[in-house]
Image (tube, grey):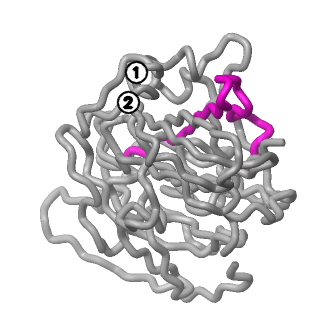
Amino acid sequence: MKSFHKFVLVIVSISFFQTGCNTGMDEDIPSISDYSGTASISQGFATATINNLFECSNGREAPLGISTALDGSTWTVPAQVNFNESNFPFASDLYNPCSGLTFNTDTEAVFALKDEDIIEVDPNGELITAFVFADNYFEMYINGVPVGKDMVPFTPFNSSILRFRVSYPFTIAMKLVDWEENSGLGSESNQGASFYPGDGGMVAVFKNQANEIVATTGADWKAQTFYTSPIKDLSCTTENGTQRLSYNCNTDGANDGTSFYALHWDIPANWQEENFDDSSWPNATPYTNTEIGVNNKPAYTNFTSIFDDPIDDAEFIWSTNVILDNEVIVRFTVE
């Protein structure tokens, strides 16, 4: 974590010669001197390293980029991921328009699984099946072992199923990413705006061999954000202990957000490990189905018997800001 930043402000005067032309900005962008938190600050677009990580019909482009912060540090946006790493397994499909595997029920999806897809964290452990809907992307570790990553980094919306053997207790650690079209600016073209900050959200259910629920996502999970954008006014952010708060920040779309800011924090090297101390992290914030907007998405609605179990209903979770926080790590230990 960067504990000290020195910034040099440069004021550039630009003359416009075209009649009737203005700056094109939706509003004046405040100074970085308004910020008093612990993050590194970048401004404007990232430099693209991959224009589109994954191609699928009717899907949005999923770029990766490098943002250079004002303190000289560099950051992969929206996140450093293992999508192209062959040693990190893909999750199996619960519903995926890109692969053509669009099951109508969880029973159909489980029946289609193969034994070789089971990840053995503990060879003599119990077989656990996880059902996940993530907006947009996830990577899951169990006791530090990679057990599955999302097949689709951005859209169309999909859902996943993972199986692994593990002994109790075990720790679930997930990197969650709300992807972006505008690299480094946490936004996409949507709702009539070129720079619209989309939302995140993840829900998961874990079942044992007897088809009993052993864990669901909820407010008892831990969640920490590591990339927040777009920020129009840096004075809107606050920090309270380990909480990185942006609920006072404007989330309206804009036609020109090229001068908006992003906040970046270092991710602990061993965040996915069983013995990582997350006790100081904030608890996850739960969100309703309506807040996340999944009632028109078959990747979710086909499996409400799983996600919305009447006895043990799983909740969507994220950090405190499901719109502006784009890279979030969540953790939970199943006893």
Seen at 48% across and 56% down, the residue is 230
Residue 256 percent coordinates (x, y): 32, 54
Q: Assess whether residue 151 is covered by the magenta stretch.
A: no
Residue 40 percent coordinates (x, y): 60, 75
Q: Outermost residue, left direction?
A: 18
| Amino acid type for the residue under numbered disc 1 | Glu
Report crowding for label 2: few under 14, some 14 to 19, many 20 or more residues within 10 A (C-alpha): few
How far apart in space, not on screen, are marks 1 and 2 (Cα)?
A: 6 Å
Residue 142 percent coordinates (x, y): 65, 54
- The quadrant of the picture occupied by the N terminus is bottom right
Seen at 80% across and 65% down, the residue is 275
Q: Which residues are magenta?
A: 196-222
Which picture quadrant has residue 204?
top right
Where does label 2 land, which residue?
A: 112
Q: Nearer the viewer, residue 125 or 171?
A: 125
- The quadrant of the picture occupied by the C terminus is top right
Q: Nearer the viewer, residue 164 or 325?
A: 164
Whether tag 1 and tag 2 are in contact, CB under 8 A, the answer is yes
| Amino acid type for the residue under numbered disc 2 | Ala
Where does label 1 land, which residue?
A: 108
Residue 52: which disc?
Answer: none
Q: Outermost residue, front direction?
A: 124
